[in-house]
Amino acid sequence: MSTKKQDKDIKQEAAEDVTCENQPDKGKEAAEGKTTEPVAKKEEKKSKKSSSQKKLDALQEKYDELNDKYMRLYSEFDNYRKRTAKERIELQKSASSEVILDILPVVDDLERAIQSFEEHQLSEEAKKGIELIYSKMVNILHQKGLKEIDAMHQAFDTDFHEAITNIPASSKKMKGKIMDVIQKGYTLNGRVIRYAKVVVGQ
């Protein structure tokens, strides 16, 4: 009897061992679960972070592109504004220069009339009237930017003077200088609109 009982106990212990071997190790699984769960979360965070970074990079690239286009457009518009303003000023100057060029012969006639006062017997009222008209016209032209080119006894300069003829100089100092002015020259706002016609000494 004792032998049978011992055999029974041995079989029961073997069955319990097999059962224990087939059952999963809860502690081990728990330990493994603890280690695998944070790794998955980290990987998920990394993927989210990389996706956000890609979006930020794409937005930054788009911003840089738009900003570059804006700066180029602004520069082009600023250049266009300056160019048109300059062209408008030049147009105004050229338009006024044509009118002033048409008026200058009248100024020349008035100057010749004033110079001939001594040759012709005119009343003082007539002389004063011509001088008044001349001074008013010259003042108006000066306000518009007209200036007479200084020529008499100056060194001949092709930028401002036009030589009609050459004559022997009265002295060595007058060589290459202007001996006489046939027609006055003028500048308008610093630009020559009529060259002074002169006689140069040799």
Image (cartoon, grey):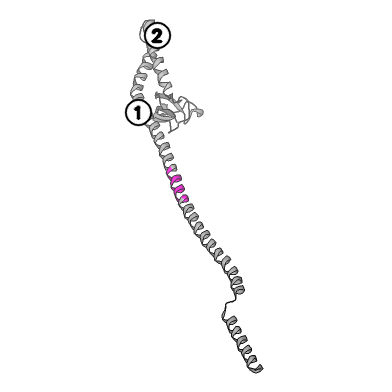
Residue type pointed to by label 2: Lys
Residue 191's spot in the image, x, y percent?
Answer: 42, 30
Seen from the viewer's position, the closer of residues 102 and 96 is 96
Residue type pointed to by label 1: Ala
Look at the image and give the residue range highlighted in magenta.
63-73
In this view, 70 is above or below 96: below
In this view, 196 is above or below 12: above
Please report whichever mark, 1 or 2, sits nearer to the chain's N-terminal start. Answer: 1
Judge from the rendering whether residue 9 lies leftward or rightward of residue 164; answer left or right. right
Seen from the viewer's position, the closer of residues 88 and 7 is 7
Q: Which residue is mark 1?
A: 95
Q: Residue at x 53, y 59 (%)?
A: 49
- Mark number displayed over residue 36: none
Q: Which residue is mark 2?
A: 128
Mark 1: secondary structure: helix
In the picture as drawn, the residue positioned furthest to the left comes out as 102
User: Pointer 1 and pointer 2: residues touching (CB < 8 Å)?
Assistant: no
Seen from the viewer's position, the closer of residues 56 and 75 is 56
In the picture as drawn, the residue positioned furthest to the right comes out as 2
